[in-house]
Amino acid sequence: MKQNGYVQKLFGIKTKRFCQTLDLKNEPELIAAYKKLHEEGHVWREILNGIKEVGILEMEIYLLENRLFMIVETPEDFNWDESMAKLAKLPKQEEWEALTGKYQKTKDGATSSEKWQLMERIFHLY
């Protein structure tokens, strides 16, 4: 699939994109389990609903070895800090972060916004 690219949805509104990175523990069995946890039908419904509830239109996570790269597409007026604070308080979010944290190279008890680091765009072409 990766050689063919990934089809993107058009939202019909102005959007903006946030990109983040996070490293997994470099253990093949943990990486495989993390991938399984994110397969369709395995992410908890409350987590998916919460992501949409805070205004995120689309979210993708890519993997290279143990490095994760997340792309988050939002409406143009989306406020990252406010939305992440709201997301952290939604049902099952703390439990999900504890579960996924077992696979991630992060501090115990870290929130999603503490674990995932926003990236700086250094190149752009339309």
Image (cartoon, rainbow, N blue to C red):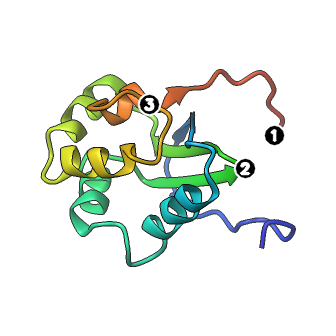
Q: x, y (%) of residue 44?
A: 28, 67
In the rendered structure, the answer to whether residue 82 lies left or right of residue 68 reads left
- Pick the residue in front: 19 or 97: 97
Q: Is 122 above or below relative to 95? A: above
Q: Name the spot of residue 121 as percent of width and height, x first.
A: 70, 24
Which SS class for mark 2?
Answer: loop
- The amino acid type, in three-letter code, at marker 3 is Thr
Earlier sequence position, callout 2 versus callout 3: 2
Q: Residues within 10 Å of mark 1 (few under 14, many from 20)?
A: few
Name the residue: 72% across, 66% down. 6
Instruction: State the CA–CA distance, disc 1 to disc 2.
Output: 29 Å
Q: Please identify the quarter of the rendering in which residue 114 is found.
A: top left
Q: Residue 11: horizontal and vertical position, in percent?
A: 51, 58
In this view, the mark in front (1 or 2) = 2
**Eyeballing the image, is 50 above or below 122?**
below
Q: Residues within 10 Å of mark 2 (few under 14, many from 20)?
A: few
Outermost residue, bottom direction?
41
Cα separation, mark 2 vs mark 3, equals 17 Å
- The residue beneath circle 2 is 65
Determine the secondary structure under disc 1: loop
Residue marked by disc 3: 106
53 left or right of 16 in image: left
Percent x, y of residue 124: 79, 30
Query: Which amino acid type is shown beneath numbered disc 1?
Result: Tyr
The disc, 1 or 2, on the residue closer to the chain's N-terminal end is 2
Regarding residue 31, the answer to whether it shows in the image is yes
> Which residue is at the front of the view, 29 or 59?
29
From mark 1 to mark 3, how far is it between C-alphas? Answer: 35 Å
| For the residues bearing labels 2 and 3, Cβ distance under 8 angstroms | no
